[in-house]
Image: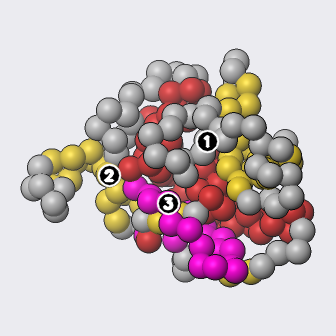
Amino acid sequence: MRTTTRIIETNSLDDHARLIREQVDASLKDPQTRWLAAALASGNYVWVNDPRTGEQVPAVRYHNRAYRVHPGSPTCGPRDFACEVVSIWNFLVLNTKYLADADGYDTYQDLRTTLETGSADCDDATVAFCALLRAIGFKMMARIISQDGRYWAHVYPMVMIPGRGWTALDITESGKEPGWEFPRAKAVRDFPMGDS
């Protein structure tokens, strides 16, 4: 399976959300997406040597590559949905760095491309979260916001955590936790990233 990145400028929010959804769906067609999400949620890690330190560190394998797991990631109990979300949050924070798109272009990467490059803009992070969490049964949507009421400039995923409700997963700002959202957005639109 090849990794995919699409570079397109959209004319509408609906087109923008559709392109994100297409990359989520492409990621879900890869059977290793389900395996990765399940390994993260269940704590099924392997131990590998960290090439930077030489120490043994927890990791998961995805397309024959080892990706680090946050050493503080909890082991989730049965039906501990919030814990599963945090495990995937920790994994993406550890293995991706926010990089903005080139001026005038939007890129839309699938999960595999995001992990192999170790980089994601807000669209790519939304794809990664939606693919991994949908792979283990979560309902997802993409929230697109405008901070000034004129330009739609940011997107992040929202996950439905049973018993807690919709929760934002925006990793584009350093040091934030699940649930954090940009304050005082002037306009918000939500787009389903699954059938339910």
**Residue at image location 62% in from the left, 58% down from the top:** 122
Q: Nearer the viewer, residue 92 or 179?
A: 179
- The residue pinned by badge 1 equals 169
| Disc 1 residue type (three-letter) | Leu
How far, Cα to Cα, is label 1 from label 3? Answer: 14 Å
What crowding class fits label 3: few (fewer than 14 Cα within 10 Å), some (14-19), or many (20 or more)?
Answer: some
What crowding class fits label 2: few (fewer than 14 Cα within 10 Å), some (14-19), or many (20 or more)?
Answer: many
**Residue at image location 51% in from the left, 66% down from the top:** 99
Image quadrant containing the N terminus: bottom right
Q: Using residue 53 as the reference point, say whether residue 118 is left or right of it.
A: right
Magenta region: 95-116
Decide which of tag 1 and tag 2 comes sooner along the chain: 2
Discs 3, 2 touching: Cβ within 8 Å:
no
Rendered view: 125 above or below 93:
below
How far, Cα to Cα, is label 3 from label 2? Answer: 17 Å
Asked if the magenta segment contains residue 109, the reply would be yes
Q: Is residue 139 visible?
A: no
Decide which of tag 1 and tag 3 comes sooner along the chain: 3
**Residue at image location 68% in from the left, 79% down from the top:** 105
Eye-nearest disc, 1 or 2: 1
How far, Cα to Cα, is label 1 from label 2? Answer: 20 Å
Please name the colour scheme applied to the rendered image: secondary structure
- The residue pinned by badge 2 equals 68
